[in-house]
Image (cartoon, rainbow, N blue to C red):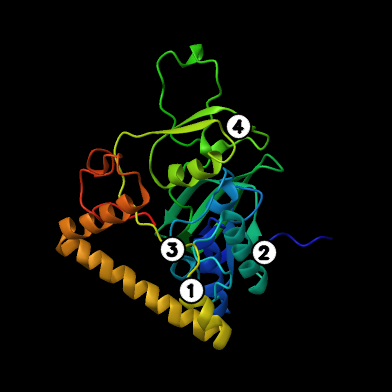
Amino acid sequence: MASKEKTDFDVLIVGAGLSGIAAAAHLTMQCPDKSYVIIEQRADMGGTWDLFRYPGIRSDSDMHTLGYRFKPWLHEKSIADGPAIWDYVQETADEYKIRPNIRFKNRVLTADWSSETARWTVTTHDEDSGKKRKFTANFLFMCAGYYDYDKGYRPDFPNEKSFKGQIVHPQHWPEDLDYSGKKVVVIGSGATAVTIVPVMAETATSVTMLQRTPTWMVSRPAQDKLANILRAIMPEKMAYAVTRFKNITMQRFVYRAARKDPAKVGKKLLDMAKKELPSSFDVEKHLVPPYGPWEQRLCL
């Protein structure tokens, strides 16, 4: 007779993305006697890096700081593309034997706390069976991110039914979308837009970015030269630790400088942009946000 599947755990983690896999790895290393389960509504792990498939998908943070402290980032590119980060999450899950502890295609419906039993009861919908399942745990660890994975924000455009072209949301990018030779308008100028535009511009007839509010950006090389040099002459873990320390220290320096003198840091960012743009482009008109650097997240 088959044994009944375990449903009671010390820790229940919601989400098998970058954070959820990290939580499981830390539990494995630091609390090996504690049982855990990861509830994931998708069919695979990876979270953001499994969900988004639009052209050029990549991180806008360097992977020596976004990556795990305990697992060196070994790719040449520090500003990495989505598939490389997806691989990194998968490798981590396999190294720490996390995969068997994930319940895929289970959507969390409710999470109820009982003071009487000091336990959480989490109810899910199992996509395969179509039934509800219940899990209990002492500790609930939310690693579900901040996206609506079913339906990203989509404004209503007046008279859009009369538009003869195709409207595409980057969160639901069609695998077979052919935009070569097309005239494209990208609405928005944040991290997603500046990732999509250069790639689409390679084959589209034209790509126009339509912006409401500018976003502060800083451009850095995709490869971290120091990281690649250190990795060639030092043990991997040591090289990674040094690079991680260097990058975190630099980010803290920039953040503190921006908070202390936002005008000075803002001028530096605009000067960097001017070097990349035609002299006829009005930087002050189009690229100056109504807020200081790091009053909102600074995109890399």
Disc 4 to disc 3, C-alpha distance = 55 Å
- Front residue of this view, candidates 27 and 117: 27
Instruction: Check residue 179 in the rendering and tell me which mark sits there, or answer none.
Output: 4
Q: Earlier in the sequence, mark 1 or mark 4?
A: 4
Local crowd at mark 2 within 10 Å, few (<14), some, or many (≥20)? many
Q: Nearer the viewer, mark 4 or mark 2?
A: 4
Q: CA–CA distance between discs 2 and 3?
A: 28 Å
Q: Amino acid at mark 4?
A: Tyr
Q: Position of residue 88 (x, y in %)?
A: 60, 65
Is 300 located above or below residue 173 in the figure?
below
Percent position (x, y) of residue 250? 32, 72
Residue at the outermost front position: 279
> Which residue occupies the extreme right position in the image?
1
Describe residue 175's horizontal placement relative to residue 65 as left or right. right
Q: Residue at x 64, y 59 (%)?
A: 102
Which-is-in-front pick, marks 4 and 3? 4
Question: Which dot marks residue 118?
Answer: 3
Residues under numbered marks 1 and 4 in contact, where contact means CB atoms less than 8 Å apart: no
Query: Vertically, is 293 above or below 69?
Result: above
Q: Amino acid at mark 1?
A: Lys
What numbered label is drawn on residue 139?
none
Question: For the residues carrying marks 2 and 1, which lies nearer the camera in this image?
Answer: 1
Which residue lies at the image location 66% right of the left edge and 73% below the top edge?
95
Of the 4 image quadrants, the one containing the N terminus is: bottom right
| Mark 1 touches mark 3? (CB < 8 Å) | no
Question: 10 Å neighbourhood of mark 3: few (<14), some, or many (≥20)?
Answer: few
Q: Which residue is mark 2?
A: 99
